[in-house]
Each structure stands twice: as structure tokens, then as C-alpha cells.
């Protein structure tokens, strides 16, 4: 799967990814930020994964192509170390609801807020 279009909507703070298979996924910037594939968020093992709070209003400042396999998303909070491969974006699209539910549950357990 490879994207044919990446479209940022700054007003809605979303990124829509259209794949060559016809699949289309729209992600909020918050979703992408809190699920960043960066080591800063994911850690180097599952035990090191961070729950990122307070990103409800984060936006996407820019996108940078990384070869023909990924995009680097530059968020307006300064985070820019995650490389979102096409495989990762497709996976996130397919599992968006469960990933979001898991994130919300982690916030609740840790007493953290989205705002």
C-alpha cells in the first residue's frame, strides 16, 4: 500500500491519507501525535511506552517526505521525530478505533487529561 495523497486540513487539525488501494483514512493531529512512532513516545520496548497527555489542540505544521516509504509529521508543539511509514499509517487507519479507545483508557487509569 502506498498513499496517492496526503492532505492536511489545518482548520480541522486532520490529515487525510488516500492509498492506492482506495482506502482513505482521516486522522486527527492529536491521534497521530499521541501515537507517534518515535522512540520518545514508543520507547525502545513496550514497557517504555509513554502516554502523552494534553494534546487535544495540537496541529500539524508541516509534512516532510522521507524517501518513498514514509512521512515525517511536524507538529505545532515542536514534536517532529516520528517517521510514519506507509505501513504504519495503513495499520493506524485499520485500527484507529481500538488505538483511540486504548489511549483514552490509559489516560483515565493514569489520571491524565487530553487538554
Image (cartoon, rainbow, N blue to C red):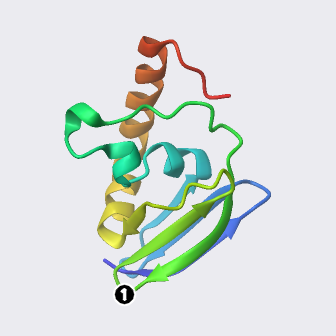
Name the secondary structure under disc 1: loop
Residue drawn at x 43%, y 60% as measured from the top left? 82
In the rendered image, residue 57, in percent from the top left (x then y), is placed at: 71, 42
The C terminus: image quadrant = top right
Quadrant assignment, res 19:
bottom left
Between 8 and 19, the one lying in front of the other is 8
Residue drawn at x 62%, y 32% as measured from the top left? 54
Q: Is residue 108 left or right of residue 9?
A: left
Quadrant assignment, res 101:
top left
- The residue pinned by badge 1 equals 68
Between 58 and 87, the one lying in front of the other is 58
In the rendered image, residue 37, in percent from the top left (x then y), is placed at: 37, 54
| Outermost residue toward the bottom in this view | 68
| Number of numbered markers | 1
In the rendered image, residue 14, in percent from the top left (x then y), is placed at: 64, 57
* Relative vertical location of residue 23 with respect to residue 1 in this rendering, above or below: above
Residue drawn at x 80%, y 57% as measured from the top left? 11
In the rendered image, residue 62, in percent from the top left (x then y), is placed at: 65, 71
Quadrant assignment, res 63:
bottom right
* Relative vertical location of residue 3 with respect to residue 87 in this rendering, above or below: below
Amino acid at each position: 500500500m502506498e498513499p496517492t495523497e496526503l492532505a492536511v486540513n489545518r482548520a480541522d487539525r486532520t490529515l487525510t491519507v488516500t492509498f492506492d488501494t482506495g482506502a482513505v483514512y482521516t486522522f486527527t493531529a492529536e491521534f497521530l501525535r499521541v501515537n507517534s512512532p518515535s522512540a520518545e513516545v514508543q520507547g525502545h520496548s513496550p514497557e517504555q511506552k509513554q502516554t502523552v497527555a494534553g494534546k487535544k489542540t495540537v496541529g500539524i505544521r508541516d509534512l516532510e517526505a522521507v524517501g518513498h516509504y514514509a512521512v515525517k509529521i511536524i507538529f505545532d508543539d515542536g514534536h517532529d521525530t516520528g517517521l510514519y511509514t506507509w505501513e504504519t499509517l495503513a495499520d493506524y487507519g485499520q485500527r484507529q478505533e481500538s488505538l483511540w479507545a486504548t489511549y483514552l483508557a490509559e489516560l483515565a487509569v493514569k489520571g491524565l487529561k487530553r487538554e
